[in-house]
Image (tube, grey):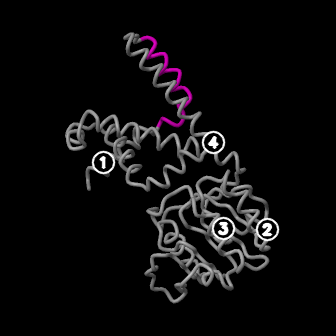
Amino acid sequence: MKVAVIGSSGGMGRFFTDYLLSQGHQVTGYDVKRTNIRDSNFESADSSLQAVEGAEVVVIATPIDRTVETAMEIAPKLGSGVCVIDLASLKGKIVPRLRTVLKKSGATHLSLHPLFGPSLSPSATMKICVVEAGTKSLALAERLFPDATLIPVGEREHDKAMGIILSLTHLLNIAYAATVAKNMSPKQFRKMESPTSAVQLSLAEAVLNQSPELYSYIQLENEFSAQLATDLIENLTELKRIIDKKDRRAFERFFSELSKNYAEDSKTALESVYEAFEVKQSR
């Protein structure tokens, strides 16, 4: 299959370029930063329009806020039946606009969200949301990513889930890192860290190592982010109230009731934390 990847030098663009080449597809890549790939099935284009010429599938792997703009740029070169894939981590404001743009060109649209970053090990199983997946969408996704775990999900359901999985997780870790930094340097922290705190700070640092532009989009453009932030603040406020009152019974009741929700999942959680801590210590 002939595939074009727009944004082929970026993190996810490069990941999917390498993956598609490994599957035997012919890939033409375009990026403002020249893609340095040595593979007989790879060709570097001088423009996005040149990249999509003759392509059966086009993967848009640009920054999320340029997804629709990129689709508009390449639309004149898209023939009927060409499938355009977006990888945006939010769908609400993007998918309807993409449908409108692509409908005029006769191209079809496949909306995917890889639930991993570009540093995923080549041997690991990819987990990918297939948004508003019909039979044809799933069939194409299965053809392109035969080894992946594909999760069919509705557009709104996807964004609500990402509000928790991405927005809330990022927000919590940013706030955690800010609180630590206000009271202790990372060097001081690492001297006395416990396994749980070490893993937590590593998560926060991993978040802060990402693109602020991407993460601001995820926070501000997800319609569910504000309510989840409110829910988080309410829980922290209640815990602070309990601490201020030195009410151990209330704390233990809060803790015990909440732990019931995670009873099955938490059986191996501490073991996983210690494994992650040991791996970190061995580096």
Q: Mark 3 against mark 4, which lies toward the viewer?
A: 4
Magenta span: predominant SS is helix
Three-letter amino acid code at the position of disc 1? Glu
Three-letter amino acid code at the position of disc 4? Glu
Q: CA distance from mark 4 to mark 1?
A: 38 Å
Three-letter amino acid code at the position of disc 3? Ile
Q: Which residue is mark 2?
A: 103
Label 2's element?
A: helix
Q: CA distance from mark 3 to mark 4?
A: 23 Å
Q: Which residue is mark 3?
A: 85
Q: Mark 2 against mark 3, which lies toward the viewer?
A: 2
Residue 176: image quadrant is top left
Q: Earlier in the sequence, mark 1 or mark 3?
A: 3
Residue 119 picture location, percent across and down: 44, 62
Q: Earlier in the sequence, mark 2 or mark 3?
A: 3
Residue 61 picture location, percent across and down: 56, 67
Q: Earlier in the sequence, mark 4 or mark 2?
A: 2
- Please report contact status of discs 4 and 1: CB closer than 8 Å, yes or no: no
- Please report contact status of discs 3 and 4: CB closer than 8 Å, yes or no: no
Classify the position of the N terminus by image quarter: bottom right
Q: Earlier in the sequence, mark 4 or mark 1?
A: 4
Label 4's element?
A: loop
Q: Earlier in the sequence, mark 2 or mark 1?
A: 2
Camera-side residue of 89 and 17: 89
Residue located 76% across and 69% down the image: 108
Magenta stretch, residue numbers? 249-267
Residue located 54% across and 30% down the image: 230
Q: Which residue is mark 4?
A: 223
- Please report contact status of discs 4 and 2: CB closer than 8 Å, yes or no: no
Q: Which mark is residue 278?
A: 1
Label 3's element?
A: strand
Q: Residues within 10 Å of mark 4 (few under 14, many from 20)?
A: some
